[in-house]
Image (cartoon, rainbow, N blue to C red):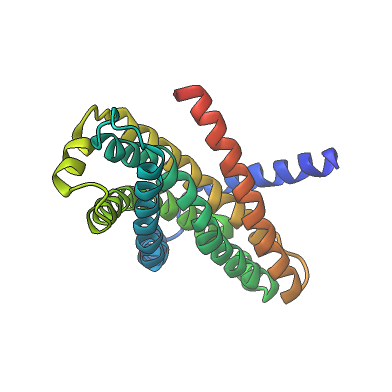
């Protein structure tokens, strides 16, 4: 079991190493990068917006339910929603969702190319398949997913504000006041550090499982499922380590 893990880890690191070569055609690589940015970013935007709105709304209502003491000012609700979205909900929960949306797509796409021998055809033509197929996906994820996390945090806080106003829990003015109180820019920095880390983990792990698929369509499905599971576990582990080191 342990030797199998070390073998997989070594293969994963060698795949990452083989990506960094001089592009055969820079324009072709750039076009692939832009295509992946569009698919990962624009394709994931609707689910990001929907999840973020409800995360913010639920956090506001649950926080108000727990803060029943009249000694605690209402503006504290907005502070808790802000910090919850920035520190945990937007970077971590959203990344787990994207592991299923983006990660499974990357794994199945590369797995299908491996099974249909398209990757072998690229190698025969003298094209570094990892540099052309894997690197743009990882680079696009690192560029786009942090942007999605920031959008998620903003939309989540706004969703909490709307939910608080509609339910009569907290007025918009008090919510805005609380959202500005004791704001630390490190919360945004921490969210970005987590999002860059998670983006790399999601894309590279999914690419590994898809790139080295052996068999047919059944194995593609298994590789896609395994990539999501491993990505989620790795995200949670990295989340704990980053929190322990930086907070």
Q: Camera-side residue: 151 or 40? A: 151
Q: Is residue 233 above or below residue 212?
A: above
The residue at the point 60 percent across, 50 percent down is 231
Taking the image as drawn, is residue 126 in sight?
no
The residue at the point 33 percent across, 42 percent down is 81
Image quadrant for the N terminus? top right
Residue at the far left in the pictured view:
173
x and y, in percent, of residue 230 in the image = 66, 50
Q: Is residue 200 left or right of residue 13?
A: left
x and y, in percent, of residue 19 in the image = 54, 49
Q: Is residue 230 left or right of residue 55?
A: right
Q: Camera-side residue: 24 or 28? A: 28
The residue at the point 67 percent across, 73 percent down is 117
The residue at the point 39 percent across, 47 percent down is 59
Image quadrant for the C terminus? top left
Q: Camera-side residue: 95 or 165? A: 165
Question: Quadrant of the rendered structure where residue 124 is?
Answer: bottom right
Q: Camera-side residue: 161 or 69? A: 69
């Amino acid at each position: 079991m342990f030797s199998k893990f070390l073998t997989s880890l070594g293969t994963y690191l060698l795949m990452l190493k083989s990506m960094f070569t001089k592009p055969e055609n820079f324009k072709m690589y750039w076009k692939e990068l832009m295509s992946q940015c569009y698919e990962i970013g624009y394709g994931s935007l609707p689910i990001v917006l929907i999840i973020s709105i409800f995360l913010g709304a639920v956090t506001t209502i649950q926080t108000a339910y727990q803060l029943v003491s009249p000694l605690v000012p209402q503006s504290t609700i907005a502070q808790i929603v802000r910090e919850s979205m920035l520190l945990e909900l937007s970077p971590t929960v959203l990344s787990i969702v994207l592991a299923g949306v983006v990660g499974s797509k990357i794994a199945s796409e590369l797995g299908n190319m491996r099974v249909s021998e398209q990757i072998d055809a690229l190698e025969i033509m003298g094209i570094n398949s990892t540099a052309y197929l894997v690197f743009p996906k990882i680079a696009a994820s690192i560029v786009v997913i942090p942007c999605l996390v920031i959008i998620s945090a903003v939309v989540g806080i706004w969703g909490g504000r709307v939910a608080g106003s509609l339910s009569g829990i907290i007025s918009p003015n008090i919510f805005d006041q609380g959202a500005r109180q004791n704001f630390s820019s490190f919360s945004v920095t921490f969210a970005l550090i987590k999002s860059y880390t998670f983006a790399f983990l999601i894309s590279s792990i999914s690419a590994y499982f898809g790139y080295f698929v052996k068999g047919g369509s059944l194995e593609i499905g298994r590789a896609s499922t395994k990539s999501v599971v491993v990505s989620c576990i790795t995200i949670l582990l990295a989340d704990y380590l980053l929190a322990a080191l930086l907070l």
